[in-house]
Image (spheres, helix red, strand yellow):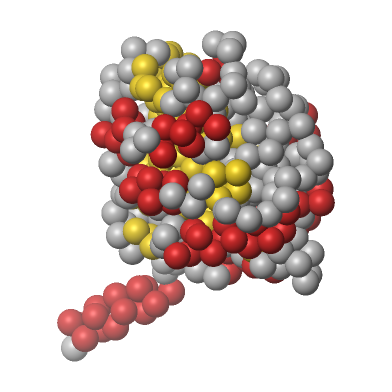
Amino acid sequence: MKIAVALASLLLLGACSSPGPAAPGPDVHLAFVGDVMLDTLPGEAVARGQDPFADFESLLQTDLNVANLECSVARGGTPEQKRFTFHASPGVVAVLTRHFGAVSLANNHSGDFGKPALEETMANLREGRLPFFGAGKDLASAHAPLILTRSGLRIALLGYDEFLPRSFEATPSTPGVAWSEDEEVVTDIRAALRAGADVVIPFLHWGWEGEAKPSDRQRRLARAMIDAGASAVIGSHPHVTQGAEMYRGRPIIYSLGNFVFDGFHEAATRTGWLARLTVNRRGVVRWDTVVARLDDQGLPHPDLDAKSPCLVAPGPIREDCVAGRAPGGSAP
């Protein structure tokens, strides 16, 4: 009788107690790179059979690599009336697919050859089985999260552009990129979480070119995204790196700078970061950055002795981490 009472008490206690925190599950390793432009000299390198990412191959051995694809990938289209227009051959898709599991199209060059070329770009990526996000056949699809599963972890990627021309924006009935409007971004993050995503990472195309520090506008929006539930915020576009910070225990890496891009001559514009994040159901558990140096063709080479930001243990960001030898523990 006493045993039965004791057992009933234990069952009642278990029924009334609050559930503990969700199990973190397995760690998943991600890598993000900034602007990848495969026209001009990088495109010529690909046409010769050269792999622009060859020197980073060992560092791209992760569960999921993500890049910002800063060009159309199409044979057709008419160049827009703007200073720079980039038009890569569809042959570059095979090289991208070799290294990346997804690309963002939310930038100010995806629409360089008009909406028909953007549609062709998306068709070429689908044919090459390279998932993309941040653009679509209409407004709803451009804002829809790309949800990819790795080791049971559902990772949602969202892409947004806030650098002109705004004519590249998708409308309810025409293709284009997802434009960054604060309320819509917040709504999309919450929708991705409701759809079952364990980790949500917005990839923003923002900031002023050449500015080494993020603007107040970037900081406000980054915090709003974290408040809405984003696990991390990643940025590109300024052609320089812009530093990183933690907010509510979650990383914001404002700009990764250039990764594959020719035509730049200053050291800052020929320096980028590869960001490595280790994530699980509790979010980002550690991260670091690896410095890329671009050569005269605009192709990246790792500088493993260069210092850059990381967070490998609870505490403040270190600005003096060296890839593979980060203080406080090993790199992801």
Position of 145 with respect to 274 (left or right) is right
Closest to the observer, 112 or 31: 112
Q: Residue at x 70, y 20 (%)?
A: 211
Q: Which image quarter holds the N terminus?
A: bottom left
Q: Is residue 329 left or right of residue 129?
A: left
Residue most extreme to the bottom: 1
Would residue 203 appear left or right of 299 to someone viewing this image?
A: right
Total labels: the figure holds: 0
Residue 58 pos. (x, y %)? 26, 34
Res. 313 image quadrant: top left
The answer to whether residue 21 is visible is no
Residue at 78%, 70% in the rendered image: 172
Q: Is residue 285 above or below residue 200?
A: above
- Position above or below: 227 against 292: below
Picture quadrant where residue 245 is located: top right
Q: Position of residue 272 (x, y in %)?
A: 50, 24
Is 17 left or right of 327, judged from the image as shown? right
Q: Position of residue 97 (x, y in %)?
A: 38, 51
The quarter of the picture where residue 222 lies is: top right
Task: Quarter of the image for the C terminus: give it.
Answer: top left
Q: Is residue 97 visible?
A: yes
- Residue located at (60% from left, 48% from top): 72
Q: What residue is shown at x 76% (from left), y 55% (from top)?
A: 169
Image coordinates of residue 60 in percent, x first then y, are: 33, 38
